Amino acid sequence: MGQLQRQRVAQLATLYVVLCSCLTIELSSAQQQPKLEIYPKQEVQRKPVGKPLILTCRPTVPDQTLVTDLQWKDNMNNTILPKPTGRNHPPMYTETLPGESLGLMISSLSSEMGGQYYCTASYANTEILQTSVTIKTYVAITWTNAPENQFPILGDDYVVKCEVKADPNPTIDWLRNGDPIRTDSKHVVQTHGLLIRDVAETDDGIYTCRAAVIETGELLERTIRVEVYIGPVITHLPATLEAVEGKPFAANCTATGKPVPEISWIKDSVQLNVANADRFKVDAQTGLLTISSVTQEDYDTYTCIAKNAAGVVDQKTKLNVLVRPSVYELYNVTGVSGKEIAITCRSKGRPAPAITFRRWGTEQQYTAGVQIDDERITLEQYFDEERGESTGTLRIARSQRTDDGLYQCIASNKGDTAYKTGHIAVEFPPDFSHMKELPPVFSWEQRMANLSCLAMGIPNATIEWRWNGRNIKDLYDTNLKIEGTGPRSDLIVHPVTRQYYSAYKCIATNIHGSAEHDMQLKEARVPDFVSAAVPRQLTATTITFDIRGPATELGLPILAFSVQYKEALNPDWSTALNRSWSPDSPYIVEGLRPQTMYSFRFAARNQVGLGNWGVNQQQSTPRRSAPEEPKPLHSPVQNDKEEPVVVSPYSDHFELRWGVPADNGEPIDRYQIKYCPGVKMAGTWHELENRCNTVEVVETTSYQMSDLSGNTYYRIELKAHNAIGYSSPASIIMKTTRGIDVIQVAERQVLSSAAIVGIAVGGVLLLLFIVDLLCCVTVHMGVMAAMCRKAKRSPSEIDDEAKLGSGQLVKEPPPSPLPLPPPVKLGGSPVTSPLDEKEPLRTPTGSLKQNSTIEFDGRFVHSRSGEIIGKNSAV
């Protein structure tokens, strides 16, 4: 068995050696056989037409130097020449390449170049080498008519173009948005495209044309965007347009379509595109036609043309030019009261304007025909359309004085409105109705009197004066002087005797008539006795009176009331004190002593002087007592059903203010304030006693309540106190606002603006003090010098000053012939009512009482002490 295996191994080894020897012999023989090789090595080269091509012929020989005459022959067995020098290349040429190879260069392959090509060479001049390659051409897929954007028109049949060239012929199919399209009632796949019947807007989309050549395996796709176009449609263009001569004009021709149509305007009579004309401007996108200033020549028919890629449409319109109205005639007219007056207005324009009127200053216009609210007035209108003129006449029958004035003519048509103003003057006889209610004229003590007569009338009236039936001009009386003859005339009367206090007649005359007016000159006298003076309010130191004056005559009012008062035990009225008030002021006598009986007498004053004293009465003041109830100076801004509520503008604080009440003989030394939060339940006030606060303040009439709660009601009680006790409390309800007041404070501030101003003022005052001190020391002048001199006055000087303030009566000066001047605002504190008066005057034992006067200007009471002179002095 072992020997058999050794024999088999020996046989296999021998066979292997024989095979290796044969292979070596074959390889050596192959390497030694010369040949030509063409690269690429495929025997058949399939190439697309129009593409460049290179074929390389390479000798495979033992010795490259023995290869000669290497060349290419075309499909017609013609030798292909090498590349010539220069820039122009033939469609086919040869070129020596590195590695002793020869390349066949074809710049653009054509179908005629298909066939068999040979590469030949000579080796060692003894052996001809030759090899060949076959070039087969085909036409690659080429899009000859397949635009990437195509635009069918709405409603038409349209072929989406996709023309393809290829050899062999390709097969074509279609896709839309990735989905295949099959031939149906809507789509038909044709040779040169895709037919879409009755194109709709929904046919917009992305289409894919796909070409395939089965023989070559070539596949190519063409993406085509299809957008449906819509033909233009003119949607708005009036059949008639109206423009106003001399004014700008604009008109719209609106069209729709896809893409947006371009719009143009054509003037038909001259076939002119007005976009190129003067004064015209056309917006091709919106169709807006504008004319900067219209003329009569612009009257014509115009065509609006809308055009886009889907089509062209047009529409005609007529432009009428309107002529603005103008008023060319309107005259002022004059008539007589009671007769007819007519004012006429004429105007022109196209169309003929409508004319109406209105009174100047009113908006209401008269209507054609008889007016509903005044049948006396009629508006007549006439039109002449042929000439473009119109006339309007406003007739007023039975004219009145109130018809006098300015009248505005209004002419209007479609183009504009014109205005012109005329005047109607209504003449009438003299009239004194405006003087019927005037008071008589007064004079006294032979003062000059002026009787003024003013006559209303058109034309102006002339005036004459009569007295006791005789013309004053004919009397030549030096005490009667006439100034002016009309329409105003003044009669200056000097009543030296009582006969001049009489009636005088003013007679006014013009061309339409005359009128008379009687004027009375009366002798004025001082007022009668005061009718009554009743004490209304008593305190220990003041008495408030209600005074009812005497009957007065129209034109001679009461100017003041005066009172004299003294203690009842003093029988001498010459030592009485005086006080005067204007008629509309509170009548308050101050500075009285408690528990004292006083005598009072009253008198009234007019322009003539002070009347007789009357209404003598005695009144005692009560004993000293607690002060009167103080009155808070707050007006309620919110009311509930039971009592008023004062609303604080703040949520956490409130400033209480009050007026100083009467002290009833003892000075007020402090005020007590109590405020408690609370609520109202079922109409009853419930205070939170444990949260009440009570404070007392001195020498002030206000108090800042702090640390309050927001949106909370507080009851506040205020009492005044003197040596005798507390007054009755004044009570108010106060409500704080909701929320928390936020006060922003600067984080870093060295000095505020107020501090800086204070420092500056202090510096100025210090400088003035130093200057005044120097003046006092050097020249004995200045404020300090005056103070030093005053401190060194003698007792006699002080006594003289005290005498000036004594309670002696002052002789009344003669009355002035002129009206008394209005009240003069004097020193003192404003008081709104007797309860609001400041602390009463106190008269300690041994002090001197002084006369005083009170004036009231409608808001405040003004008091003045000392000697009484002028209109408020007492007699």
Image: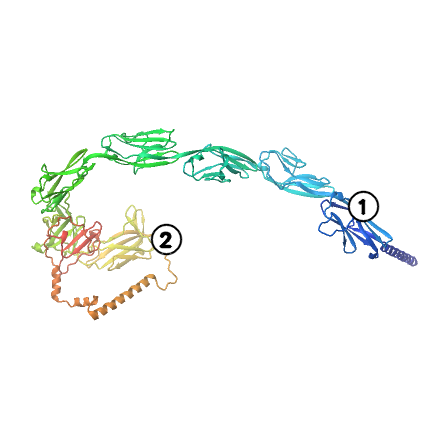
The label shown at residue 77 is: 1
Q: Residue furthest bottom?
A: 778
* Few, some or many residues within 10 Å of mark 2 (<14, 14–19, 20+): few
Residue 736 visible in the picture: yes
Secondary element at image label 1 = loop
Quadrant placement of the N terminus = bottom right
Q: Nearer the viewer, residue 608 or 646?
A: 608
Q: CA distance from mark 2 to mark 1?
A: 113 Å
Q: Amino acid at mark 2?
A: Gly
Residue at screen point 87% across, 53% down: 126
Residue under numbered circle 2: 739
Q: Residue 799 location in percent, x, y? A: 11, 63
Rendering quarter of residue 590: bottom left
* Scheme by which the image is coloured: rainbow
Q: Residue 559 location in percent, x, y? A: 15, 48
Q: Amino acid at mark 1?
A: Asn
Q: Nearer the viewer, residue 43 or 830?
A: 43
- The disc, 2 or 1, on the residue closer to the chain's N-terminal end is 1
Q: Nearer the viewer, residue 8 or 311?
A: 311
Residue 472 visible in the picture: no
Q: Nearer the viewer, residue 135 or 603?
A: 135
Relative placement, left or right, of 297 versus 680 is: right
Q: Residue 338 location in percent, x, y? A: 22, 31
